[in-house]
């Protein structure tokens, strides 16, 4: 019989052997894990990607000191301290003291907003967005080296959402300007800013599109669209090209969540620079003015005016005494080129004119009665208000067979009041448009004043009757109408 001592000794021996074997195996496995694997990427590819990575990092490193953090503070006064009168009861205050406000006593609270800015001159001029600094009573600027300054507002332009501030500092790191007109979709770009208060954050992407307008962010829009990550706090920050040049001021994002979803917009550098220089020099933005009302070239209008494509802008009205009238530009002309540049659409033309220095002579290429011609205009300063001239007429009523469902009358004081017209408004006005008519589908509405029918001027009801007398339901009709002071062309196509 084996004694307990012998059994214990044997068990300990087996255990010791197991430990030794385990250590040996684990040591071997550890050594195997420490042996580095061989990269499957070719040496040439690694070299190229490393150089690219270092180049991109160099751009970010050089540009980052030029982007600043901007914070604004304002005091908001609420009309009343509290709606509960019992807070002012002596018994209540005996136990709770004055930690609650007295009723009907205004309270003050501080509201802070954060954004970004870009240093554009060594002596302290900084560009940002208007919405970053508007209503701010104190503007603070924090540099990348942790120095902070109180900034002075030089000027702001809500129409482009650009503002200029200045700090008292010298020898700052300013970004060089890039030419935003040379940008194209697919170009690599960097966005630098302070999203969510995280200073000097760099993101990279590509330019998704250029010339974005009708976004609804500002009055003058020519946005660069990018997928470089832009978040709250990036507003006013820099959009750079691969040369480290400033090509845009980050302004807004399209998002359903409030965060980044791949669509960001920046004011192009050429537009921003023009606004900045005007704000610094004049304390306001001086914009160029041609003096025309314009509308888009649609497929129907292109056919009527003989345009080869849908580019350009149709002149629907010319202001009396304007540079356009003096140059000989007429209603119905299609503006094809402005100062040597092709006109893409109405927003493009509007932006080009607004950025043209006052007193500049520009050549305007037109399509008139299906023939091209060129005139020269001297750009004036955009006035605060422009006047429109209206024709005259008398009373009557008529429904056209060609414009079935449309009833017109000459303007009377009663009709003028009904449609909110000016007391001096005269002419032939549409008073009824059937909802299932071809005219309604084309966009005609009650209150529209008919100025032309197929290029024939309409002053009286007799003019209108004569113009539509020979029209049939199977032909295209081109109308020029005035709506709330603005002239526009409307095309009615056969059903």
Image (cartoon, helix red, strand yellow):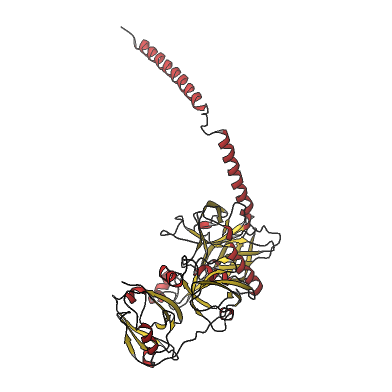
Residue at 43% over, 59% down: 255
Q: Is residue 302 left or right of residue 279?
A: left
Q: State the quadrant of the N terminus.
A: top left
Q: Quadrant of residue 283?
A: bottom right
Q: Is residue 194 visible?
A: yes
Viewport quadrant of the C terminus: bottom left
- Which quarter of the figure has residue 356? bottom right
* Residue 33 rendering spot, x and y as whole percentages: 49, 27
Foreground pick, 83 / 21: 21
Vertical relation: 117 (above or below) 492? above
Q: Residue furthest right?
A: 171
Q: Position of residue 430 (x, y in %)?
A: 36, 84
**Residue 108 visible in rendering:** no
Camera-side residue: 120 or 95? Answer: 120
Residue in front for this viewpoint, 257 or 81:
257
Coordinates of residue 278 in the picture (x, y in percent) = 63, 71
Q: Does 211 sit above or below residue 21?
A: below
């Amino acid at each position: 019989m084996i004694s307990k001592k012998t059994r214990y000794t044997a068990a300990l021996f087996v255990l010791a052997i197991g430990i030794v074997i385990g250590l040996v195996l684990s040591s071997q496995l550890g050594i195997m894990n420490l042996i580095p694997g061989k990269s499957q990427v070719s040496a040439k590819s690694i070299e190229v990607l490393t150089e690219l990575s270092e180049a991109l990092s160099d751009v970010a490193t050089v540009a980052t000191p030029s982007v600043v953090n901007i914070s604004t503070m304002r005091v908001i006064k609420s009309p009343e301290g509290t709606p509960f009168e019992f807070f002012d009861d002596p018994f209540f205050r005996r136990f709770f003291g004055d930690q609650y406000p007295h009723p009907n006593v205004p309270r003050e609270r501080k509201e802070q907003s954060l954004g970004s800015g870009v240093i554009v001159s060594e002596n302290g001029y900084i560009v940002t967005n208007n919405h970053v600094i508007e209503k701010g009573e104190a503007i603070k600027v924090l540099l990348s080296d942790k120095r902070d300054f109180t900034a002075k507002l030089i000027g702001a332009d809500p129409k482009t959402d650009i503002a200029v501030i200045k700090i008292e500092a010298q020898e700052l790191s300013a970004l060089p300007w890039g030419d935003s007109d040379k940008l194209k979709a697919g170009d690599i770009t960097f966005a630098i800013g302070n999203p969510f208060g995280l200073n000097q954050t760099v993101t990279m992407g590509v330019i998704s599109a250029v010339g974005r307008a009708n976004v609804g962010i500002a009055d003058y829009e020519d946005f660069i669209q990018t997928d470089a990550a832009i978040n709250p706090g990036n507003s006013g920050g820099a959009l750079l090209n691969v040369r480290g040049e400033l090509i845009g001021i980050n302004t807004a994002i399209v998002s359903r969540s409030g965060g980044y979803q791949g669509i960001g917009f920046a004011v192009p550098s050429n537009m921003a620079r023009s606004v900045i220089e005007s704000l610094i020099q004049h304390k306001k933005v001086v914009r160029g003015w041609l003096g025309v009302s314009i509308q888009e070239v649609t497929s129907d209008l292109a056919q009527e005016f003989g345009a080869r494509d849908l580019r350009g802008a149709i002149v629907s009205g010319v202001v009396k005494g304007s540079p356009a009238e003096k140059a000989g530009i007429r209603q119905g002309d299609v503006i094809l080129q402005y100062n040597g540049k092709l006109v893409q659409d109405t927003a493009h033309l509007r932006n080009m004119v607004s950025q043209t220095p006052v007193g500049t002579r520009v050549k305007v290429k037109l399509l008139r009665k299906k023939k091209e011609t060129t005139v020269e205009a001297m750009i004036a300063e955009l006035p605060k208000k422009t006047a429109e001239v209206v024709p005259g007429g008398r009373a009557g009523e008529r429904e056209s067979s060609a414009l079935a469902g449309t009833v017109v009358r000459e303007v009377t004081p009663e009709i003028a009041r009904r449609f909110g017209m000016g007391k001096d408004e005269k002419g032939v006005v549409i008073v009824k448009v059937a909802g299932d008519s071809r005219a309604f589908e084309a966009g005609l509405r009650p209150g529209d004043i008919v100025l032309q029918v197929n290029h024939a001027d309409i002053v009286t009801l007799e003019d209108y009757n004569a113009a539509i007398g020979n029209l049939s339901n199977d032909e295209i009709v081109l109308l020029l109408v005035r709506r709330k002071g603005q002239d526009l062309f409307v095309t009615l196509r056969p059903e």
